[in-house]
Image (cartoon, helix red, strand yellow):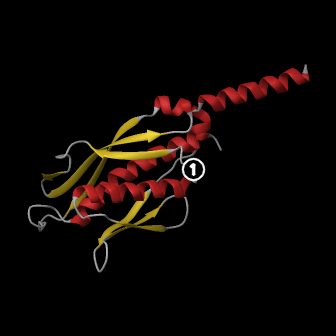
Amino acid sequence: MPASDVSYSLKVLGTEVVAGPGEPRLVVGYQGRRALDEISQPLASLDLDGLLAGCEAVAQAIFHREFRLNDQVDLHFTLENRNGLKIWHTQPTLYMKCPLTMSMKWSCLHLSQIYKTMTTLGVIELPSELSLVGNTVGVNETARVIMDSMASGVEFMGNIMLMRSSIDHDAEAGRGLAAHAVASRTV
């Protein structure tokens, strides 16, 4: 199948912070290349830093489950700025957005020179009337928008993995050498 016919799609089907006896957990259901799956990740805290760290661990786990890669290929996320999570209202809908910077680590020198960072944007729709917890949006909404942003980063890297043979300089050079070796044997 040509690389242009191959694409990767990741759907986050549910994101929930489960707080109960013991430590809180982030539970994320998703659909990718394989059957529906779910990841449960302990959270160190329910503040923004704890949610970001938990969501990143889930995004990394999804990426590695989907593509079964070595530890030389990885992704990390940082919030664009501490005020990056924003709510905005467009009549009649209320949204929450989360811009993140994704840093990519590749085992291939060619990819690591081309694809270093990118901005991902998570957007979720909120109910038109939203109860605030103190002065903040609830942890479930916050975790949902963070996972939405990280899922777009996982999708991007997944698509690069599927197209790697057509964009990887080392693979192209290897094919050229193999073709040259075959041609020299037939002469």
Along the line of sight, the residue nearer the viewer: 22 or 29: 22
Horizontal side of 90 relative to 3 (left or right) equals left
Which quadrant, please, contains the N terminus? Answer: top right
Reply above or below: 7 against 12.
above
Horizontal side of 119 relative to 156 (left or right) equals left
| Residue 46 appears in the rendering | yes
Q: Amino acid at mark 1?
A: Leu
**SS for callout 1:** loop
Which quadrant, please, contains the C terminus? Answer: top right
Which residue, as the protein is rendered here, is positioned at the far left?
Answer: 135
Along the line of sight, the residue nearer the viewer: 154 or 43: 43
Residue assigned mark 1 = 69
| Residue 4 appears in the rendering | no
Query: Where in the figure is residue 33, as x and y percent of width and height?
Result: 54, 58
Q: What residue appears at the point 16 percent right and 62 percent down from the top-left corner?
A: 137
Q: What residue appears at the point 52 percent right and 54 percent down from the top-left corner?
A: 64
Residue 156, picture quadrant:
top left
Q: Residues within 10 Å of mark 1 (few under 14, many from 20)?
A: few
Which residue, as the protein is rendered here, is positioned at the far bottom?
Answer: 21
Query: Where in the figure is residue 144, as x and y percent of width and height?
Result: 29, 61
Q: What residue appears at the point 38 percent right and 36 percent down from the top-left corner?
A: 117
Q: What residue appears at the point 39 percent right and 61 percent down from the top-left corner?
A: 12
Query: Where in the figure is residue 43, as x and y percent of width and height?
Result: 32, 65
Number of disc labels: 1
Residue 52, picture quadrant:
bottom left
Horizontal side of 29 relative to 140 (left or right) equals right
Query: Where in the figure is residue 11, as x and y percent of width and height?
Result: 42, 59
